[in-house]
Every structure is written in C-alpha cells, then in structure tokens.
Image (cartoon, rainbow, N blue to C red):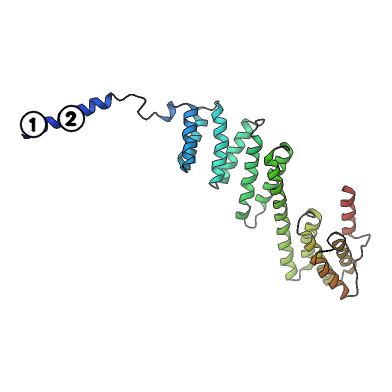
Amino acid sequence: MIKWEIHHFIFISLFMTLLSGCIPGSIKEVPVSKKSAMEIYNEATASIKDKDFTDGISLLNEVERLHPYSPYAKNALLTLAITYHSQKDYENTRLSADRYLEFYPKDKNAAHAQYLIALSYYDEIDQGGRDQELTYKALQSLRLLSEKYPDSDHTKTGTLKFDLVFDHLAGKEMRVGLFYLKRKQYSAAINRFRVVVEDFQTTSHTPEALHRLVECYLSLGLYKEAETAAAVLGHNYQSSEFYRDSYKLLTQKNLTPNMKKKSWLNKLYKKIAKGN
C-alpha cells in the first residue's frame, strides 16, 4: 500500500512537470526587455492609475531606456515629470521635463513641460525657508513659459502664479523692513521698503511700504521725504487705511502730503507714468 502511494506521488509529480512544460509561451511572464514600447507604457500608466507609483515610474524609465526613439518614449518622459511632481519629487520632475524640452522643444506639449519646471520651483518655495533662490528660479521659469509659449493655456495659469511669486518676494522685503523698523534701525528699514516701492510696485505690499516710509522718514526728521511718500500713497491708494494712518502721523507734526520735485519717489512715479 505504501509502495503504491509512493508510485502514485511520483506519477503525479511527473505529470505536473510535463504539463507545465506544455503551457503556451504567451501565458508565461514576458521579460520587460522583450515587450514593445506600447506594452510597457500601458503597464506603467495602469500601475500609476492603481497608485503603484514606484512600479509605474520604473516602467516609464524602461520605455525611455529600451525604446528611446519610440513615440512612447516621448510620452513616457512627460508622464514621468507629471508623476514625479504628484509625488513631490521636484528634482526629478525638473530632470524629466528638462529632458523632454531638450529632445522635443517644438512639440505641442513643450509648454506643459516648461510649466512643470516652473511649478516644481513654485511648490518648493514654502520649503525654502529664508533662501530666496527657489523664488527667483520660479520667476525665471514662469517668465520663460510666458515668453516661449504665449498662447498656451499653461501660460495663463502660469501668469497667475507669477503674480503670486512676485508678491511673495515683496512680502519677504516687507518682513525684513518691519524687523528693522521695530528695532528703530530706520535707514536699514528704508532700504527694504524702498525696494518694494521701486521693484514691486504692482504688488499688494506697496501701500504699506509707502506708509512705513512715512514712519521712518518722520522718525529721522526727514519731513519732506515723509510728505512726498504720503502724497504718493494718497494719489495711488487714497482709500487705503495706510493712507489714513500716514495722514494722521503728518498732521500730528503740522505736515501735509506734498510731492517734492527732488524726491526719489517723485522721480520714480514720473518714470512709471511715462512708461504707462
């Protein structure tokens, strides 16, 4: 009985071995190197759709490596950039988008690649702490997007982000200026507020910057400059609470908003008026 069971087991084992050898090759797992660009790309996008980003990214890289001249390699590069960005891997986002622009600068999706580069810098700004390099790179990338692809829908979105980045830079100058003002370091504060007024006059921080200039100039006894700053503030932002505060500070010293011809502010705003 025992011998029969042993023979039976051997027979079943041999049968299963022979059967496995008869399985069609199409059912067996095909190595990635043997697959077409389309097959690998479709598997990659399916993995990403299932939120298996590690496998999806790996397969997209294989498309580019194994089939560099295939149309799917182009799609894979852009999809890589999009996927990396979704995972907040901003460095690889830029690397993939840069490669896309290097190989396909005239492609219809080139604007999308440039937008991803700008967006990766934009999304990293809050992680940059006090370092403004990322902010400037975001501005540069957004400006390049606008210049090279003016008619793209991505450029329209990028323009809004450009304004936000611009405002961010102005806000940084304001914070530093207020830091100095609080410590009564008026000259240092003036330098910061002046940057806002001269370089970022289209941002939301300009009214406050002008008001803080009034405060600083009054503290230093530079009354003509204070009157000019208040005049500029009143002319451009008369309904602003900052103008009301500046006007109140001036009247306490029997002064009034008055534009002085020799003031840098007067020269600046004349120049801006001519430019418009």
Whichever of callouts 2 and 1 sits on the residue coming sooner in the sequence is 1
**Secondary structure of the residue carrying numbered label 2:** helix
- Quick one: which residue is furthest to the left in this view? 1
Corner quadrant of residue 258: bottom right
Residue 113's spot in the image, x, y percent? 63, 38
Neighbourhood count class around disc 1 (C-alpha, 10 Å): few under 14, some 14–19, many 20 upward: few
Q: Quadrant of the N terminus?
A: top left
- Quick one: which residue is furthest to the right in this view? 261
Corner quadrant of residue 96: top right
Residue 167's spot in the image, x, y percent? 72, 55
- Residue marked by disc 2: 12
Neighbourhood count class around disc 2 (C-alpha, 10 Å): few under 14, some 14–19, many 20 upward: few
Circles 2 and 1, Cβ within 8 Å, touching? The answer is no
Q: Which amino acid type corresponds to the residue marked 1 in the rendered image?
A: Trp
Q: Is residue 29 left or right of residue 243?
A: left
- Residue marked by disc 1: 4
Q: Which amino acid type corresponds to the residue marked 2 in the rendered image?
A: Ile
Residue 199's spot in the image, x, y percent? 79, 53
In the image, residue 15 above or below residue 56: above
Q: Which mark is residue 125?
A: none
Residue at point 76% right, 71% down? 184
Q: How many marks?
A: 2
**Secondary structure of the residue carrying numbered label 1:** helix
Distance from disc 2 to disc 1, alpha carbons, whole Å, reads 12 Å
Residue at point 87% right, 72% down? 250
Q: Is residue 21 left or right of residue 138?
A: left
Residue at point 13% right, 30% down? 8
Q: Nearer the viewer, residue 154 or 66?
A: 154
